[in-house]
């Protein structure tokens, strides 16, 4: 996928640019995003993540679920053949960008239109804040594919929603709108015009001293952000991938 970057005044923007595929993601996407995150200019106070076209990101490239996978990248079936240590390292590598946003001094904001499904929803959740169109559609559909979220989705849900609502939404993969996501506290601002919604959200943050905003973010993430959930996600996904691999082998016999 082509990923565009732009730096204007105090805002650094990352744009997913594969609209024909609704900005479907692959492991290479996550490596690109992580590399970009290491090059954000020091004078940028805000990081904006958005997608070109009709959708923010409709999730993983479906080819990842096939034995052949995406050319040049491992398929889920290849991952399932790894031993536990190798698979843990692989998933930890994929999680890097989804984790690093909380450690950056910039306040990150996802601008969501159309679809934010699966990995797309987890990418938006990785940001500190979300601006969404009211009609945007969100879902963690991993369980419907026989998997579990492993890119921070469970971490963010538990932070925002607690156990019961997290179980209902992750367990079912139910689709919610931007309006419902706002009511649940997952979305910070709902606006038809995402750029106006972004200004509404970050203009008050611009009014405070940069160092105070950085320290406030650091304080809050230190309280809320633990390591253990990430390990739990990797172990859960390892189990699911092995199950899918076994099921595929049995169906081919």
Image (tube, helix red, strand yellow):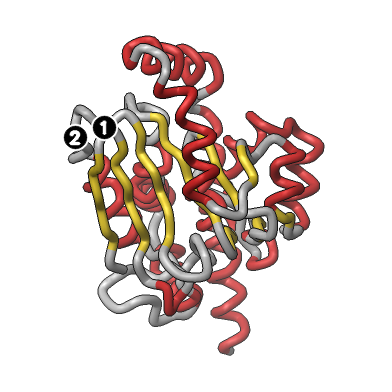
Q: Residue at x 21, y 28 (%)?
A: 43
Question: Which quadrant of the structure image shows residue 210?
Answer: top left
Occupied quadrant, residue 8: top left
Where residue 165 appears, x then y in whole percent? 79, 40
The secondary structure type at the circle numbered 2 is loop
In the image: residue 100, left or right of residue 178: left
Tell which of 162 and 178 is nearer to you. Answer: 178
What is the spatial separation of the Cα atoms under label 2 and label 1, in whole angstroms? Answer: 6 Å
Q: Is residue 47 above or below residue 243?
A: above
Q: Which residue is mark 2?
A: 41
Instruction: Name the residue that disc number 1 marks.
Output: 44
Q: Residue 78: give x, y in percent of width and height.
A: 39, 69
Compared with 126, 118 (above or below) is below
Mark 1 lies on a secondary structure that is loop
Of residues 151 and 239, the one drawn nearer to the viewer in this rendering: 151
Where residue 106 appears, as percent x and y from the top left, is 34, 29
Quadrant of the image occupied by residue 83: bottom left
**Residue at x 27% of width, y 59% of height:** 4
Which residue is found at the position 23% from the left and 44% from the top?
Answer: 7
Q: What label does residue 169 carry, if any?
A: none
Outermost residue toward the bottom in this view: 253
Q: Are marks 2 and 1 in contact (CB under 8 Å)?
A: yes
Bin the neighbour count of mark 2 within 10 Å (Cα to Cα): few under 14, some 14-19, many 20 and up: few
């Amino acid at each position: 996928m082509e990923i565009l970057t732009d730096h204007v005044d105090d805002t650094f923007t990352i744009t997913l640019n594969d609209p024909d595929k609704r900005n479907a993601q692959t492991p290479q996407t996550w490596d690109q995003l992580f590399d970009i995150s290491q090059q954000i200019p020091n004078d940028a106070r805000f990081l904006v993540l958005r997608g070109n076209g009709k959708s923010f990101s409709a999730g993983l490239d479906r080819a990842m679920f096939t034995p052949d996978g995406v050319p040049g990248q491992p398929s889920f079936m290849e991952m399932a053949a790894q031993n536990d240590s190798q698979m843990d390292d692989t998933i930890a590598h994929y999680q890097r960008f989804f984790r690093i946003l909380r450690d950056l001094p910039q306040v990150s904001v996802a601008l969501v239109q159309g679809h934010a499904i699966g990995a797309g929803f987890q990418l938006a959740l990785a940001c500190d804040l979300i601006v969404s169109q009211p009609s945007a559609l969100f879902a963690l559909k991993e369980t419907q594919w026989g998997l579990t979220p492993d890119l921070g989705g469970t971490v963010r849900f538990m932070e925002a929603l607690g156990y019961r609502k997290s179980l209902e939404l992750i367990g079912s993969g139910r689709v919610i709108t931007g309006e419902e996501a706002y009511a649940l506290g997952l979305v910070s601002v709902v606006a038809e015009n995402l750029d106006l919604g972004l200004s509404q959200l970050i203009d008050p943050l611009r009014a405070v001293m940069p160092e105070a905003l950085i320290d406030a973010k650091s304080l809050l993430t230190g309280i809320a952000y633990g390591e253990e959930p990430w390990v739990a996600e990797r172990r859960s996904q390892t189990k699911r991938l092995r199950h899918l691999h076994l099921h595929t082998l049995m169906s081919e016999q």
